[in-house]
Image (tube, helix red, strand yellow):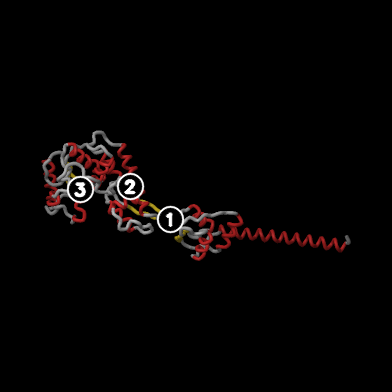
């Protein structure tokens, strides 16, 4: 090989080497740029909610993020994921994207399904009908129960043989947007079964009822009668003592529940004397079903009543929800008179049994 040819060969090698080095540098710089794009803070200055619909692909999600101003360069993010072999499965739901979240942070939220949780609250003492109203008024739920009867609702959640009243635990429930209302009901149903079973395991000896369902009925009466948590067990004790003696429970809330839409805000003498399955002034024993959704304290009070010997209670009228508990009819009638005088004789009852009664 002549010298010129050798020199040309060396020049070609040098050129190729320079091109390889330049390509490597470019690739390195490109990778660095992709990494910075993927890990750098995003453009949005405040936390923003972002909805991912079911079936949305990663490509579509990135495009929507860029269109919403939450992502700077969707294509660069896709290239980064492709180069590094990263697979991201986007889970549907509503996400809260933090201020200046990087693409990496956003995709981590998607992959882990860390959706925003909504919530609804059902208060202790609410009825099943109240629960349905709360569900109907709660946004972000999938509403499926409109115009459904209670029996249809129970069939939908898989408990067709159960009466709905009392079977759902009053609590605050958190859920992802798009959750079906029936799923919330099922959560509340299972929660009540757990709470009732736990309370039943702690029951005292000698109770005048022998099934958890009867304890649930008793708990619902206590829930509606007790305004003070400290009095729940004492009220339960009065009801238990009356059941043991064969006395009618004479609980106004049962009468009110039986009246349904006919209740006008006051309990009248005619209401107390008109017989119905829920009128505990005319019928002995517990009503046929619970009258509300009782909470944990009332469940425990039903199975662990306080043994005070009292057979009567009536509101004191002091405005704090307290009651006066009496062992004898004479003492009770005096307490009722004091209550009526305090109320200036303008309002019936306030606790049950409240009116002067014979055992």
Between 262 and 32, the residue placed more toward the observer is 262
Separation of residues labelled 1 and 3 (CA atoms): 40 Å
Q: Are marks 2 and 1 in contact (CB under 8 Å)?
A: no
Badge 2: few (under 14), some or many (20 or more) residues near its Cα, within 10 Å? some
Q: Are marks 1 and 3 in contact (CB under 8 Å)?
A: no
Between 345 and 244, the residue placed more toward the observer is 244
Say whether residue 315 is visible.
no
Q: Circle 2 sits on which residue? A: 159
Q: Circle 1 sits on which residue? A: 116
Q: Are marks 2 and 3 in contact (CB under 8 Å)?
A: no
Q: Is residue 355 above or below residue 110?
A: above
Residue at the right extreme of this rendering: 2
On-image quarter of the N terminus: bottom right
Q: Circle 3 sits on which residue? A: 254
Q: Residue 50 appears at what percent x and percent y?
A: 46, 60
State which quadrant residue 130 falls in. bottom left
Say whether residue 115 is visible.
yes
Q: Mark 1 or mark 3, which is nearer to you?
A: 3
Badge 1: few (under 14), some or many (20 or more) residues near its Cα, within 10 Å? some
> 300 left or right of 325?
right
Badge 3: few (under 14), some or many (20 or more) residues near its Cα, within 10 Å? many
State which quadrant residue 38 falls in. bottom right
């Amino acid at each position: 090989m002549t010298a010129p040819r050798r020199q040309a060969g060396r020049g070609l090698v040098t050129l190729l080497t320079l091109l390889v080095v330049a390509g490597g540098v470019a690739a390195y710089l490109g990778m660095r740029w992709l990494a910075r794009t993927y890990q750098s803070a995003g453009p949005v200055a405040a936390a923003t909610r972002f909805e991912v619909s079911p079936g949305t692909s990663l490509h579509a999600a990135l495009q929507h993020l860029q269109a919403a101003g939450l992502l700077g360069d969707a294509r660069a993010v896709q290239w980064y994921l492709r180069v590094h072999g990263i697979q991201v499965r986007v889970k549907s739901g509503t996400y809260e994207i933090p201020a200046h979240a990087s693409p990496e942070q956003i995709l981590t939220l998607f992959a882990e399904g860390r959706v925003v949780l909504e919530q609804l609250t059902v208060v202790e003492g609410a009825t099943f009908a109240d629960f349905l109203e709360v569900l109907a008024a709660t946004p972000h739920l999938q509403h499926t129960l409109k115009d459904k009867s209670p029996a249809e609702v129970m069939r939908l959640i898989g408990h067709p043989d159960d009466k709905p009243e009392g079977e759902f635990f009053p609590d605050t429930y958190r859920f992802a947007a798009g959750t079906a209302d029936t799923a919330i009901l099922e959560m509340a149903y299972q929660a009540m079964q757990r709470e009732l079973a736990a309370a039943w395991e702690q029951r005292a000896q000698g109770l005048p009822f022998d099934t958890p369902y009867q304890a649930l009925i008793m708990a619902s009466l206590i829930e509606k009668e007790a305004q003070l948590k400290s009095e729940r067990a004492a009220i339960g004790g009065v009801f238990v003592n009356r059941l043991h003696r064969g006395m009618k429970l004479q609980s106004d809330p049962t009468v009110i529940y039986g009246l349904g839409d006919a209740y006008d805000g006051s309990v009248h003498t005619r209401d107390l004397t008109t017989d119905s399955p829920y009128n505990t002034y005319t019928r002995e024993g517990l009503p046929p079903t619970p009258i509300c959704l009782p909470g944990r304290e009332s469940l425990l009070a039903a199975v662990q009543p306080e043994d005070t010997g009292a057979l009567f209670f009536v509101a004191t009228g002091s405005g704090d929800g307290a009651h006066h508990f009496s062992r004898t009819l004479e003492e009770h009638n005096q307490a009722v008179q004091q209550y009526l005088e305090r109320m200036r004789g303008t309002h019936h009852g306030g606790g049950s049994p409240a009116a002067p009664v014979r055992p």
